Amino acid sequence: MPVLDQLAELKRIAIVPALNEEETVGRVIDEIRAFDPGFDIVVVDDGSTDRTAGIAADRGAHVLRLPFNLGIGGAMQTGYRFTFEHAYDIAVQVDGDGQHDPSQLPAILAPVLSGEADLCVGSRFTGPGAYRSSFARRIGIQIFAHVVSAIVRQKVTDTTSGFRAVNRKGIALFAADYPHDYPEVEATVMCVKHKLRLTEVPVSMRERGGGASSITAFRSIYYMTKVLLAIFVGLFRRYAVPFEEEHR
Amino acid sequence: MTPLPISIAAAIASFLLLMIVFELIRSRRLRERYALLWLLTGLVLLALSLWRGGLNTIAGWFGVQTYPPAILGAVGALFILVVLLQYSTVISRLSDQNTILAQRLALLEQQLREEGPTALTR
């Protein structure tokens, strides 16, 4: 596989955010290794109260155990800080809940490896495999897709997907600045504002393997409002083009 | 009836509040999650200032016939109360987290002191 050949020369890492995912995190780690044993894996345990951290450590993953729940934004940024400080060339985000299928990593890695994109997002909505979700959630996803597409001036279909690959530029940016709370939508916009190139590829996602989604119906209104506000205010910020400065 | 100068002053004040909150978010001195209540406060006060008939109607509901702008003050006070309550919960969470951080740090320092820097590398 050409993707594996290209990867072999790179220092590569999978960032796996996990909150109480003891049922699935082990399988996620195994599946990433099955795709490419050369991937380092860092599990960011966002204050789990179950055996998530222990299971991940037993499988030889690096485990960053946050002393309390920071939320997915703070957890992901912790993973990116680790990734940046240890000078990885390329990083993928794979959720610890098992909804992302590591066998599809070649799809999201290819555009980044070829240098065509700095950030590649796996989209549930552009390709095969219907993604089932609640009506309200689909509406929200549609609104975000339209708003983000208009701002970044390219078609974006899945702004909330956390199945992503980034190169060194993206790693540097996310280590320095990553949105809080519900970060994916804002991170997508932020990338483009910082002049990083974004692309989407179709992927299919699985039903959640275990645990509970972090976004309940009750919170989705707050979520929409908060993210739309953040995007709106973000339009009035100035952004610098990130550079790959040496750390330390 | 609400005196016009009161409505104008209240509208300007609400608008200023909204602008200040916006600038604080933009310059990253205020996180969006803590700005939402302030924005709601500003929007409701702005609406009540501009919609003068509405303010009179609402004042009527509460039996305030003499001076409808009192409702503006009451609504403003109510929102401030809610914001303060939110802050109390935020401060409580922060101090809990601060305790956990201090405890973790103490444990780490003890480990480093007694077992040397290699204690942490497995």
Image: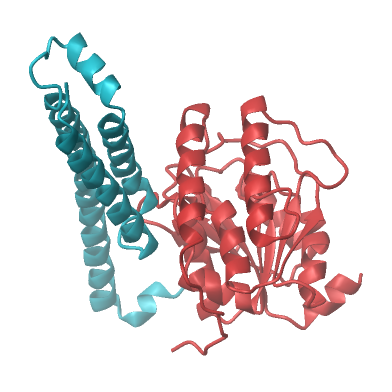
Residue in front for this viewpoint, A195 or A202:
A195
Image position of A23 (left or right of A67): right
Residue shown at 76%/55% (left/top)? Answer: A155
Residue shown at 29%/47% (left/top)? Answer: B15
Image position of B37 (left or right of A58): left
The answer to whether one can see residue A160 in this image is no
**Residue at the right extreme?**
A1
Chain identifier for the cyan-coloured part of the image? B
Residue in front for this viewpoint, B116 or B98:
B98
**Residue A197 versus residue B88 in the image, above or below:** below
Residue in front for this viewpoint, A154 or A180:
A154
Residue in front for this viewpoint, B20 or A8:
B20
**Residue A63 drawn at (x, y percent):** 51, 62
**Residue A175 drawn at (x, y percent):** 50, 71
Image position of B118 (left or right of A211): left
**Residue A19 versus residue B65 in the image, above or below:** below
